[in-house]
Image (cartoon, helix red, strand yellow):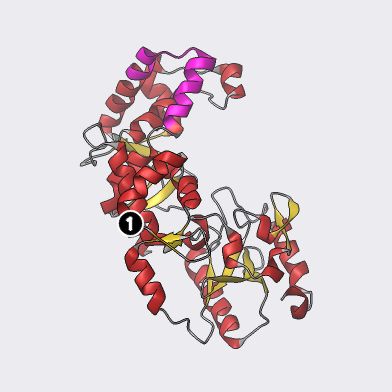
Amino acid sequence: MEVDSDVAKLEIHEFASARGCTYLLPAKHFQVGIKCGQGFNADSAIRTAKSKLGVTDKEIYALKEGILAALQSGPLGASDFKSALGNLYQNFGEAGKKVGQTSNVSLGLLALQAEAKIRRIPSDGRLDGQSYSYRLFENAPIVDDSFPQAQAFKELAALFWQWCGFASMAHFQWFSGLGVKAAQAAAEHLGLVGLEDTALLGLPSTFDEYCCFQLPEEPVFRLVSGLDSLFLLRRDLSLHLDATEQGLDVLSQGKLSNLGALNDLSTHAIADRGRIVGLWEYDFDGREIVWVSFVGKPPALLAEIDRVQAFIQNELSDARSFSLDSPKSRQPSLARLRELSKSASGDLR
């Protein structure tokens, strides 16, 4: 696939970025993405190791140097570092298990990724795999103190509102992981314009586009991931739902919850011109999309479902909602969607 080829050529890559979460970034955003991720995962793990496990700065420095030396000969899988590090390797035993750190290897790997000295790569070349190795980051972007983090967050704010169109300052605070004052400082240079009677803000150019925009008269159905940026960048599903759908009970984290009360989708979504008009999952065993529509079954929607189903069957083999999703763990969600789909379409509108 094209995306796998782009990963191999380092035109795109996954990094711990905004608020420490993993994002797939294009090469032109590597620097900003990595810099905005500093201070989250690696720093948190090191603080825990120091306070709970007695790890010292000297030990962490030696560990990082040992990992870099071990990678000089080529990529290594996570399990290879135990022998490669020799005496530098530490197993934290039961104390480590209690804080989620079985050994010191993850500390060094997280820290070096945050410093853009190494990068994690999928062992089979596919981003949807669960096996990784690590290698030195050749021609890495500069992410030391010569590139201030405040500048990185200013660039992130500009990108965020370019991606979102309209979003509130609270939305940006969540996405960036910044506090109120820091988020406002990062965005103050943008000249954001408020959307009347809402807390939503947009770039002046976006506001001009919005004023000239004419909504298509015919539906534009798209089956998108629950992690699509249409939802993920704001975590505010109420913006995309009609009032009648907000009270729909869906399965989330093993229990029924109102769809409109959720921050994140627990399934994939059917979208139409920015609105959520249905939900879907892929049944791996049945090799079919299981779905429910809030707008009936118009031919254009059925055609789109057939198109995406064929794409999954022929190109992907499966469509996961998140990294730990599996055909087995998906069964309750599939059952709930089937239950909803049996309801009369009128009951869901």
Q: Is residue 6 left or right of residue 281?
A: left
The question of residue 180 being in magenta is answered with: no
- In the image, residue 183 lies at what x, y percent? 41, 44
Q: Nearer the viewer, residue 180 or 2?
A: 180
> x, y (%) of residue 253?
69, 49
Magenta segment: 42-61
Q: Main secondary structure of the magenta part?
A: helix
Q: Which residue is at a point 52% across and 71% down the rendered structure image?
A: 274
Residue lying at 51% horizontally and 80% vertically, measured from the top left: 220
Looking at the image, which residue is at 47% across and 81% down?
215
* Residue at image location 34% in from the left, 44% down from the top: 153
- Find residue 232 and report its horizontal and vertical position in percent: 51, 56
Q: Is residue 165 above or below residue 323?
A: below
Query: Would residue 45 be counted in the magenta stretch?
Result: yes
Q: Is residue 10 visible?
A: no
Residue 244 position by quadrant: bottom right
Taking depth in this image into account, of 271 and 234 the one nearest to the observer is 234
The answer to which image quadrant residue 89 occupies is top left
Image side of residue 52 versus residue 181, left or right: right
Compared to residue 178, the image places residue 293 above or below, namely below
Q: Residue furthest front?
A: 197
Q: Quadrant of the N terminus?
A: bottom left
Q: Residues within 10 Å of mark 1 (few under 14, many from 20)?
A: few
Q: Could one spot residue 275 in this view of the protein? A: yes
- According to the picture, the residue beneath numbered tag 1 turns out to be 191
x and y, in percent, of residue 328 in the image? 67, 53
Quarter the C terminus occupies: bottom right
